[in-house]
Amino acid sequence: MIREDVYRQAIALIESSHSVLVTTHTRPDGDACGCVAAISEVLKDLGKKVQPLLLSPLPQWYAFVFAEKVPVLGKDLRPEDLTRGAFADVDLVILADTGSYSQLTGLENYLRQSGKPVLVIDHHVTSDKLGRVEITDETAGAAGLVLYDFLKHARRPITRTVAEALFVAIATDTGWFQLSNTDSRVYRSCAELVDLGVKPTELYRKLYQDFSHERFKLMVRMLSTLELHLDGRYASQHILLEDFARTGATHPDTENLINECQRIGSVTVAALFVEHKDGRVRCSLRSRGEVDVSDLAARFGGGGHKMAAGTFLPGPMENAKRLIFDEVARRLGP
C-alpha cells in the first residue's frame, strides 16, 4: 500500500515540472515499454514537454505501443547529448520499472551528476533509492499496476491509448495472466482497462503472433542446446554470437525464449545464457518458486523477482554456465 503523502509528493513533483525525461531499464520488456508510453501520454495531456528515452533497442513487437519512434541512448544520441538540445531543459526524470543503477547503463553518470529530481515508479525489491520520491509497491505484479493506481489516485483521465499501454505492461509481466504474480488485483485492473476500450485479443496478436522468421530460427538453435541437470529440475540453454549471425536475429529477439523449456514438467529452475560482443554473458533465470532467482541473480550483481530475474556474468560461456549451475545445485540440494 502506497502512503498518501508519497502520492502527494509525486503529484507535486510532476505539477512543478515543465520538461520531463521518461525512461526505463535496459532491455525494455512489455512492462517497461507500457509504462514509458503511458506516462508520456499522460504528461503530454498535462501540457508537459516530454522526452521519452530508451537505453536499449526496442523489441519490434512493442513498437506499436509508442505513437512516435523513441530515441535510443548510444544509438540515436550520446550520454553527453542529454545536457543539450531537446534535453537541456529537463527538470524532472521519471524512472519506470526500475530503481537500480545496474539497470540504467549509460545513464548512471547523468543521474549522479545532473542533480535533476527523480521520480521512481516500480515494483522490484532491488533498489538503489534513486528517487526524490519513490512510488514502489513490491506486492504489485507489474510496474504498470503501480502506475495505474497512481493515475487513479491523481484522478487523471485515462484515454484508450493510455489504457492499452497499461494493459500491455500488466499482461506481459504476468505472462499473459499465467504467472504466479497474477492475483485478483491484476484481473480487476485489467477488467477496468477493458472497460476503457482495450481489446485484449488484438493486443495478444500484436505481442505474441507477430514474430519474425529470424526469431523463430534463433529459437530453433536455442532449443538444440537444451540440457537438463539435477534429475531434470534445472534446464540450461544458450545462444552464441554465431547464432545471431546465422539467423539474422538480434539480441532483443531473445526476450521470453527462456520460457520455452519451462514446458517440461520436471523443470523448476531454468537459465538462458546469451553471449554478448563485449565478452559478457547475459543470464536470464526463471523459477517455479522453489528457488528465489532474484536472490541468486543478486549474487552476481543482478536482480529481479523471486521467479524471474537476470544478471550479467563474465565469459566465456562455459564459465558463466558453471557459475549458475553451482548456485542452482546448492539451492536445490540433492
Image (cartoon, rainbow, N blue to C red):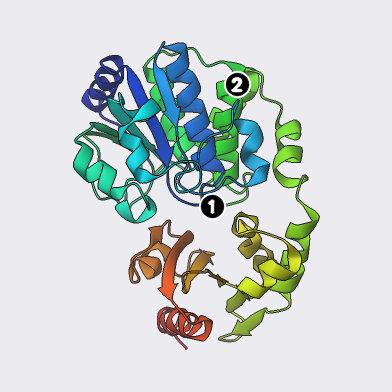
Residue 126 in view: no
Q: Is residue 274 visible?
A: yes
Residue at 60% x, 59% y: name it.
Answer: 251
Q: Residue furthest bottom?
A: 334
- Residue 24, position in %: x, y? 43, 42
Q: Residues within 10 Å of mark 2 (few under 14, many from 20)?
A: some
- Write the residue at 46% across / 63% down: 310
First-in-chain label (1 vs 2)? 2
Q: Secondary structure at mark 2?
A: helix
Q: Answer yes or no: do the residues labelled 1 and 2 have beta carbons within 8 Å? A: no
Identity of the amino acid at label 1?
Answer: Ser
x then y, percent, for residue 68 = 59, 27
Instruction: Count all numbered tags in the image, as a single digit.
Output: 2
Classify the position of the N terminus by image quarter. Answer: top left
The disc placed on residue 275 is none
Relative image position of residue 101 (x, y in whole percent): 31, 52
Query: What's the amino acid at mark 2?
Result: Thr
Q: Position of residue 176 (x, y in %)?
A: 64, 44
Q: CA distance from mark 1 to mark 2?
A: 27 Å
Residue situated furthest right in the rendering: 213
Q: Which residue is mark 2?
A: 161
Direction from residue 97 to residue 175 in the image, left or right? right
Left or right: 251, with 224 as reference point: left
Image depth: mark 1 or mark 2 in front: 2
Q: Quadrant of residue 265?
A: bottom right
Q: Is residue 97 above or below residue 331?
A: above
Mark 1 closeness class: few <14, some 14–19, many ≥20 residues within 10 Å = few
Numbered disc 1: secondary structure: loop
Task: Choose between 89 and 92: the one closer to the eye.
Answer: 89
Residue drawn at point x = 72 percent, y = 65 percent? 218
Specify the label residue 180 is tagged with: 1
Q: Is residue 33 above or below residue 92?
A: below
